[in-house]
Image (spheres, rainbow, N blue to C red):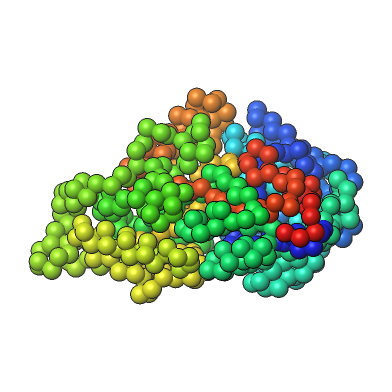
């Protein structure tokens, strides 16, 4: 984002944004554990930026959209299926969702099949994004995603609203005169999408007041930039290697796993994990701002991360032995191992383009896998741009056997939405009865007990380490340059404020 005149803030980004765990906003959440009900109560006199009131109808409407068969997005998952009556509504057996009730204009009650402690946190299972029903009710659900109400002029109940969109380039925000806390301090904000290759030059020229998702691979080139403070924090994210183990049945809305597939042998997957020196990658490629990842629950979740699991630490000899024991041997002396059946094995690896390290990092992985005798080639013969990469994963592209991805995780770490049987985001397409059981334990009522919750998280982390359908590679730290003229902005998970309070102390950067 950039702040561009005395009361205009300018921001730049390659992605990202701020999050908050607090429910001290426009609504209050009460969770009745015994009754398995959540009550969402809106404050009085909260309005959308077009002046219309925010009501319980707006809280309920997204459930009606996401649960509808005509919905074109990917949010319909286990969390929504957990709502009483949602599956009947989704299947067309009911015209409404029996478990969602409007108590009055400000109060909504939602009944769940099961409740879990993550539901007390942002993104933990109680959906937190109202939609203006007065605008969308007249737009067919199948057309909403591409509508002007989404793409060009969305309304907001936050401190600013979108006033102008230049697709792929920038978004302009103006103050929301109806904001419930009062008018914010800036006259305008402009959020600009800047290529990674030119962002360092841009802050040296002081074009932006703040930069989201600053690249870390070239940190030394900007860490001492005059006129900026460099804020840092652990990122709610990790990088991982994923293996193609099946498909996603869109009709049934569930993962179909095929362990007879090319990457179905767990020892093959484990060997590929042990071939990588992720601490060296973090040091050399990311200036020490990334470190070897050990489990799928990052250590930022201090009470839930299992520190006893050491992960796939670099061990070439162990990797080779795993392949030997599994029957992957070089039977024709060409330097590459064949399958246990003696067939040629070529593994197609997909990795995203972007940044200075993308190509050398992909080359490093391929080199390391070659060292243990695996013939790995880039899927499509080159790095793949972000949109095409995830389109291929969503559509189970058979060209991809292994891929390097990254997840930004929510402040509620329950992994059902990424690794559950019904999760469209489960790109490795791994499922099992044991995985179902372990995930169910994480989101069970028993997990309200802190010891039981820790026990459930540890058991799942251990299981996923052993099965290796995905292998976490790097935990990440993130950097945000902030101009010295920016005041009243914080960037930590305990006290990340919205842009209502932000102001500028000087006319120029």
The reply, left or right, for residue 307 in relation to residue 34 is left
Q: Is residue 132 left or right of residue 408?
A: right
The residue located at (71%, 46%) in the rendering is 489
- Name the one closer to the observer, 176 or 392: 176
- Residue 302 x %, y %: 51, 33
| Residue 182 visible in this rendered orientation of the protein | yes
Q: Considering only vertical position in the picture, is 156 above or below 399? A: above
Quarter of the rendering containing residue 491:
top right
Q: What residue lies at 59% left-to-right and 42% top-to-bottom?
A: 411
Q: Is residue 418 left or right of residue 24?
A: left
At 54% from the left and 34% from the top, the residue drawn is 444
Q: Nearer the viewer, residue 309 or 443?
A: 309
- Residue 505 position, x and y percent, is 79, 51
Name the residue at the front extreme: 226
Residue at screen point 53% across, 68% down: 197
Q: Quadrant of the N terminus?
A: bottom right
Position of 24 relative to 374 (above/below): above
Asked if residue 157 can be seen in this view, the reply is: no
The quadrant the C terminus occupies is bottom right
């Amino acid at each position: 984002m950039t702040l561009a005149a005395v009361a205009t803030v300018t921001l730049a980004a390659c992605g990202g944004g701020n999050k908050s765990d607090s429910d001290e906003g426009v609504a209050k959440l009460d969770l009745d554990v015994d009754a398995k009900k959540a009550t969402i109560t809106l404050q009085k006199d909260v309005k959308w930026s077009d002046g219309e009131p925010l009501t319980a109808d707006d809280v309920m409407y997204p459930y009606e959209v996401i649960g509808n068969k005509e919905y074109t997005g990917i949010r319909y998952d286990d969390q929504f299926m957990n709502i009483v009556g949602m599956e009947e509504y989704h299947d067309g057996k009911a015209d409404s969702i029996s478990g969602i009730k409007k108590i009055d204009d400000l109060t909504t009650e939602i009944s769940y099949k099961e409740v879990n402690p993550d539901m007390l946190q942002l993104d933990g299972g109680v959906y937190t994004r109202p939609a203006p029903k007065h605008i969308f009710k007249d737009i067919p659900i199948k057309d909403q995603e591409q509508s002007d109400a989404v793409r060009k002029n969305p309304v907001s109940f936050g401190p600013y609203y979108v006033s102008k969109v230049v697709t792929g380039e920038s978004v302009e925000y103006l103050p929301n005169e109806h904001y419930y806390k009062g008018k914010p301090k800036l006259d305008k904000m402009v959020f600009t999408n800047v290529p990674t290759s030119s962002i360092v030059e841009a802050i040296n020229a002081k074009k932006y007041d703040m930069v989201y998702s600053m690249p870390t691979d070239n940190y030394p080139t900007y860490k001492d930039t005059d006129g900026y403070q460099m804020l840092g924090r652990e990122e709610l994210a990790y990088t991982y290697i994923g293996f193609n183990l099946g498909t996603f049945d869109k009709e049934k809305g569930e993962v179909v796993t095929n362990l007879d597939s090319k990457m179905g042998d767990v020892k093959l997957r484990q060997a590929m994990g042990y071939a990588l020196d992720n601490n060296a990658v973090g040091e050399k490629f990311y200036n020490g701002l990334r470190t070897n990842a050990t489990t799928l629950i990052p250590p930022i979740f201090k009470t839930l991360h299992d520190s006893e699991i050491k992960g796939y630490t670099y061990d070439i000899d162990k990797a080779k032995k795993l392949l030997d024991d599994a029957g992957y041997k070089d039977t024709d002396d060409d330097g590459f191992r064949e399958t246990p059946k003696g067939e040629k094995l070529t593994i197609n690896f997909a990795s995203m383009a972007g940044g200075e390290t993308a190509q050398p990092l992909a080359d490093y992985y391929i080199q390391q896998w070659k060292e243990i005798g695996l013939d790995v080639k880039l899927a499509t013969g080159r790095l793949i741009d972000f949109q095409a990469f995830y389109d291929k994963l969503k559509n189970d592209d058979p060209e991809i056997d292994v891929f390097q991805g990254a997840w930004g995780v929510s402040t509620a770490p329950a992994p059902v939405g990424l690794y559950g049987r019904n999760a469209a985001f489960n790109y490795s397409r791994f499922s099992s009865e044991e995985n179902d059981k372990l995930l169910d334990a994480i989101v069970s009522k028993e997990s309200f007990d802190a010891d039981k919750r820790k026990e459930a998280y540890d058991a799942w982390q251990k299981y996923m380490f052993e099965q290796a359908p995905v292998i976490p590679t790097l935990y990440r730290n993130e950097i945000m340059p902030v101009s010295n003229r920016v005041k009243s902005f914080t960037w930590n998970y305990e006290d990340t404020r919205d842009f209502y309070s932000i102001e500028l102390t000087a006319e120029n950067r």
